[in-house]
Amino acid sequence: SPKKKVTLYLLFCVSTAVIGSLQFGYNTGVINAPEQKLRGFFQNVSMERYGEPFSPGTNTMVWSFAVAIFSVGGMIGSFSVGTMVNTFGRKSMLLSNILALVGGGLMGLSTLSQSFEMVIVGRLVIGVFCGLCTGLTPMYVGEISPTAVRGAFGTLHQLGVVIGILVAQIFGLEFLLGSDSLWPLLLALTVVPAILQSIMLPFCPESPRYLLIVLNQEEEARKALVRLRGSEDVNDDIQEMKEEGMKMALEKKVTVLEIFRSQNYRQPIIIAIILQLSQQLSGINAVFYYSTGIFDAAGVTQPIYATIGAGVVNTVFTVVSLFLVERAGRRTLHLIGLAGMAICALIMTISLSLVQKATPSLSYLAIVGVFGFVASFEMGPGPIPWFIVAELFSQGPRPAAMAISGCSNWTANFLVGLGFPKLEELCGPYVFLIFMVLLILFFIFTYLRVPETKGRTFDDIAQGFAASAGKSSPSAAPESVMVPLPDGKEPAPMSPTERLPMVDLPPEKQ
């Protein structure tokens, strides 16, 4: 059937978008390896300017700031996604690349101008860029993919991220770009994918959903779909979008505040936020930002290679989840992932605490724990929160919902990045018990509250929430049954041959 068909052109467009995810991963992971080089650079600048080096405390503060400011940029970027998308369409990705060039340029030139502020400002700008990427990429990919492979393609965003992290870890090796003289190049390397994506994007179509629903250009949308699907028969797709468009004419553009106020969106937005938190507060970034230190503490002799090993495991399991997500379903995978991570957190705690009580043979257990933790993460909590958010909302509230959930992800990311070193000082080897408790709580929430979205159309998913909101509060029920058209809003024109969609359609099974 044409539903299943994946064309080369579709793959080209998805790959182009996923370069954005690659950037996000690269810039997340790149700061881990050259830590000592950067700290040394901060000291040199201080010597040149003030005639004395920073105190260790000040140096650590500048360092943490350079790491964490990236997440602040991310919050800003992810919050601007909705505005950008509705103004410039999905070509916003082109514009956002300018930020990558500016940020990469600033960091690359920091040693020449002897300025550590340039590193920090560069990290901030790159953060804004990556925040945009985390919203734009999953959204564009979700909107151009056929329903049957939407989940698998949604996982590609996460695959891009983990490959980016892996590439950053490899390039960060001392004998490649992680050296005293070359680290500015390591940080600036992010401009290469930005240029590549800018060359490829003009060949990609605007999202057909955006063309039809936002701009009301049916011909253009049809053309884009024919190219993406590789067949003339795109009536089903057009029909599904029109139905969504009719509904959208009824549900106005939704602002961030309205999402929290409205009965119909409250449940899905809470789910979206908690899923994003389950990704960040699972402790995965603690493992990635500080993996080398963890292996070191566990007594592994070559920690940097164990870290790269974790990066490889990360990538392999993301590919595995690609193939599982349409078969096993989103909810199941998320639950399996959370459970696996909780068990591995326990293993890491045991191995780290016993190593300190002199059982050195346990250092390999720590490696098993970390690898298992990472593998479980990529089964569920890694990829699923990003694209399930796009699935929980229809076109009207989707940009605002992506902004809210993206922002909550970045905020949690920021807090973990800033707080983990302190927590580790306080709790020592028991730090992962905190994450274990959180993981168990997220497991319970997912089990009780998160619906399965596998193989359902966006419309059908939104309807499920409307129904449950209606049940819980009678006040919301009438509004979901009778909807007057807002003034001056005409539904998208239909040609007489197409069946006129009713406003409330029964969920169709494919």
Image (cartoon, rainbow, N blue to C red):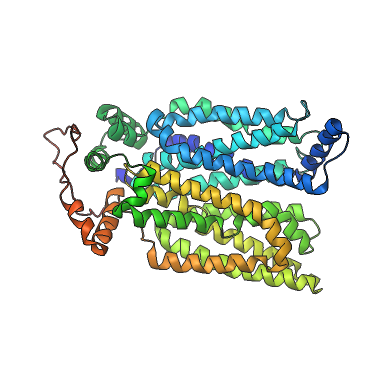
Residue in the image at 29% along x and 46% along y: 1
Provide residue 102's location: percent of width, then percent of height. Answer: 61, 27
- In this rendering, would 296 be left or right of 377? right
Residue 361 vs residue 430, the one in the foreground: 430
Task: Work out which residue is located at the far front of the displayed protein and give it.
Answer: 50
Residue 4 on image: x %, y %: 34, 46
Horizontal side, residue 409 vs residue 308: left or right: left
Report the number of discs. Answer: 0
Location of residue 326 with respect to 350 vertically, above or below: above
Q: Is residue 1 left or right of residue 421?
A: left
Q: Nearer the viewer, residue 7 or 138?
A: 138
Image location (x, y in percent) of residue 482: 15, 49
Which one is nearer the viewer's eye here, 325 or 339? 339
Q: In which image quadrant can residue 461 be found?
A: bottom left
Answer yes or no: is residue 454 visible.
Answer: no
Residue at the farthest left position: 496
- The percent position of residue 309, horizontal first and vertical second, equals 68, 54
Which residue is at a point 51% across and 56% down the rendered structure image?
277
